[in-house]
Image (cartoon, rainbow, N blue to C red):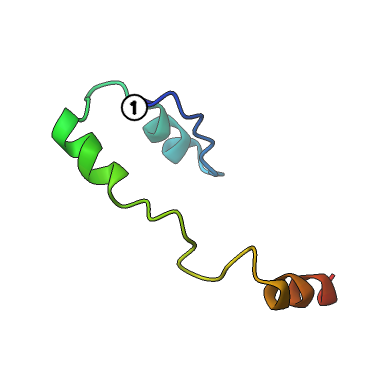
Amino acid sequence: MQKDVVIIPKCTHKERMQENFDIFDFALTDAEMTQIEGLDTGKSLFFSHHDPETVEWFMSIL
């Protein structure tokens, strides 16, 4: 939210939905935001979306 990124949580329980709205009672520091930004390597941890073999495999299971 501090970076103006839309967040769409998946939830089916009313209590958890209410908890998801409780995000406005704190803010991350600049140092914390920098640490989080450092986690993004720009690469998938699971597979490459640009690898032709991976794309072919996905298309084969459709």
Name the one closer to the observer, 13 or 32.
32
Please state if 27 lies on the left or on the right of 49 as rendered: left
- Count of number-bearing discs: 1
- Of 24 and 27, nearer the camera is 27
Residue 62 visible in the current orientation:
yes
Above or below for 2 versus 10: above
Quarter of the image for residue 3 reads: top left
At label 1, the amino acid type is Asp
Percent position of residue 28, x then y: 21, 30
Give whichever of 22, 14 is nearer the camera: 22
Q: Quadrant location of the N terminus?
A: top left
Instruction: Answer left or right for 45 relative to 49.
Output: left
Q: Horizontal and vertical percent for residue 6?
A: 51, 29
Tag 1 secondary structure: loop
**Mark 1 crowd level (few <14, some 14–19, many ≥20, 10 Å Cα):** few
Rendering quarter of residue 16: top left
Question: Where 31 falls versus 56 (above or below)?
Answer: above
Residue 29 appears anywhere in the view: no
Which residue in the structure is indicated by mark 1? 22
The residue at the point 30 percent across, 43 percent down is 37
Image check: 58 left or right of 36?
right
- Residue 19 vs 43, above or below: the answer is above
Pick whichever, 25 or 30, lies toward us: 30
* Residue 23 locus on image (x, y percent): 33, 27
Residue drawn at the location 85% of the way across and 70% of the way down: 62
Identify which residue is drawn at 68% across, 74% down: 54
Residue at 51% from the left image edge and 40% from the top image edge: 9
Residue 58 sits above or below residue 9 on the image:
below
